Amino acid sequence: MTHTGGFQDDDFWTEFYDFLFSDQRFIQAEDLLDTSPLLALPAGARVLDLCCGPGVFTVPLARRGYAVTGVDRSPAMLERARALSAERSAPATYVEADVRGYAQPGAFDVVLNMFTSFGYFEDPADNARALRTMHDSLAPGGTLLLDLAGKELLAGRVTPPKVVRRGDDLLVQTDTVLDDWARLRSDWVLVRGDRVTRASLVWFVYSAVELRQMAREAGFGRIEIFGDFDGRPYDQDAQRLILRATREG
């Protein structure tokens, strides 16, 4: 079986769910919300979790009393998120929508886009458009937190194929640089018993300089770059590329 539609293919998210959303990822989200200065959100904040998936951040944010809206284009992931919200008594609003078209002008104090969920549209203009909808959905003074694997970091991590095992399942991931480091292709092969499933994802990768410029062009004011959720600089010790940007009045 082959999935070539990548993030737009709902079967992809279902087939590879255990590798994309391991138990450790949910635990990590809880820990980040407890410890990260970047995720110390104002009490009672209205939070938009764009590309929320199965509610990795949406649900723990709702449990902490925030008014959270999770947006995703995958019905299967939203179904899981709603089930998790019900199971943990964490009411949240869930919307099936494309991030390019979902904008609620001035409706949110915080917009989150986590775990490299940005840059997957084939047309660069669509990625820029998605960033503008994030800006427009913020109230004046509101904050965007955008979390990516930055180009500078990926340059040191595109290595021979990665092999990950979950129980009896085996995933082999091979990354290929495209277009002079403008994009990356990730080819996945999942082996479950006698069944083999293949998928490919292609996305744009951004340096800190490129992402800052995109945020400025989208209308954001104060723009900061961090190297991880602990607020460290984006330098040789960085683990993530995290952009924090403010919508001005």
Image (spheres, rainbow, N blue to C red):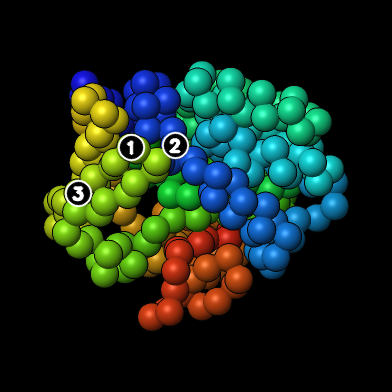
Location of residue 183 in the rendering, given as x and y in whole percent from the top left corner: 23, 50
Whether residue 43 is visible: yes
Q: Are marks 1 and 2 in contact (CB under 8 Å)?
A: yes
Secondary structure type for disc 3: strand
Q: Residue at x 56, y 32 (%)?
A: 54
Q: Which residue is mark 2?
A: 18
Q: CA distance from mark 3 to mark 1?
A: 17 Å
Location of residue 173 in the rendering, given as x and y in whole percent from the top left corner: 24, 47
How would you rate the neighbour count of disc 1 (Cα within 10 Å): few for under 14, some for 14-19, many for 20 or more? some
Q: Which numbered disc, 3 or 1, marks the residue that appears first in the sequence? A: 1
The kind of residue tagged 3 is Thr
Circle number at residue 174:
3
Q: Quadrant of the N terminus?
A: top left
In front: label 3 or label 1: 1
**Is 30 positioned to the left or the right of 51 in the image?**
right
**Is 130 positioned to the left or the right of 87 in the image?**
left
How would you rate the neighbour count of disc 3 (Cα within 10 Å): few for under 14, some for 14-19, many for 20 or more? some
Circle number at residue 16:
none
Q: Which numbered disc, 2 or 3, marks the residue that appears first in the sequence? A: 2
The kind of residue tagged 1 is Asp
Q: Which residue is mark 1?
A: 169
